[in-house]
Image (spheres, rainbow, N blue to C red):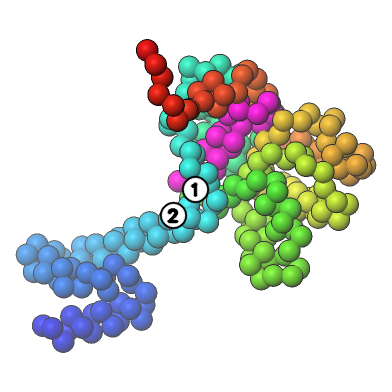
Amino acid sequence: MGTQTDKIRQYADSLRLTHLRNHAEATVHQAQIDKPSYLDYLIGILEKEVDKRRETDYHRRLNMAGLPNNHNLDYYDFNVSNGISKPELQQLRELIWLEQNFNVVLMGPSGTGKTFIASGLVFDAIKQGYKAYFLPMEELITIIRLKEMTSTALAKYNRLIKAHLVAIDDIMMFPMKKYEAVAFFNLIDHLHEKSSVIITTNKSPKQWAETLEDEVLSTALLDRLLYRCEVVKLSGESYRMENRQTIFSKNE
């Protein structure tokens, strides 16, 4: 029995059947108890392998997504009025727009929930099997700048251009050098109508030209982002400031 189980493990390892390799004895023991048909037994083994691979793939995509700590929209606070309603957020979470390669622009002052919504939509996409990534604009510029020099940056860039969804946080917050702006445009141009992009920004599109210092480039960038796009304008006071925490005890 032991030798046969060892062979099962070896064959499962060669075929990368992870669940069977790790649970060979338990699988055989359960079959001796349940006495399933050959067909049911084979289907059961394959089903567990598929489930294991899906779980592994999910955790791999989640680990690589770059999500901030708070990214679960199930905990969205609708008591805070910021310009987006519960039905509107629910419609975004259905991700029909992602299937149609639509973009989403979240525009509004700091602290109104742009990052939370963007990262939450990335999380929802990952749960539904999509390859999705979240990254601040500053990190994206670093990747663009280093992709010709380091394999790590190039690998990250290649993952972005193959993604179903890329969320870029705080776009146009800082000025960009000319070659960085052109490289950023090239990325958006590559993703255009092939993937979906989420943009968060506290600047209006008209102000983008000032940040890029190139009206022609900003117009071309906006043309691609806004062609198939839902613009969500958020408003109100900063949630972080209204719920600011302190290290001091409050005296009654």
Q: Residues within 10 Å of mark 2 (few under 14, many from 20)?
A: some
Q: Is residue 215 visible?
A: yes
Q: Which residue is mark 2?
A: 58
Depicted 33 relative to depicted 107: above or below:
below
Instruction: Tell me the residue at 85%/51% (across/down).
Output: 177
Depicted 208 relative to depicted 25: above or below:
above
How far across and how far down the image is residue 74, in percent? 43, 31
Instruction: Tell me the residue at 63%/61% (across/down).
Output: 156
Residues in magenta, as a range: 105-128
How far across and how far down the image is residue 233, in percent? 68, 24
Residue type marked 2 = Tyr
Question: Going by the picture, which residue comes out furthest to the left?
Answer: 33
Q: Between residue 236 and residue 156, name the one nearer to us.
A: 236
Q: Is residue 117 magenta?
A: yes
Name the quarter where the C terminus is drawn.
Answer: top left
Q: Between residue 184 and residue 189, name the one nearer to us.
A: 184
How far across and how far down the image is residue 209, in percent? 87, 37
Q: Between residue 251 and residue 167, name the one nearer to us.
A: 251
How far across and how far down the image is residue 111, in percent? 61, 28
Question: Going by the picture, which residue comes out furthest to the top?
Answer: 252
Q: Which residue is mark 1?
A: 126
Residue type marked 1 = Ile
The disc label shown at residue 70, or none: none
Closer to the chain start, of discs 1 and 2, is 2
Q: Is residue 113 magenta?
A: yes
Q: Secondary structure at mark 2?
A: helix
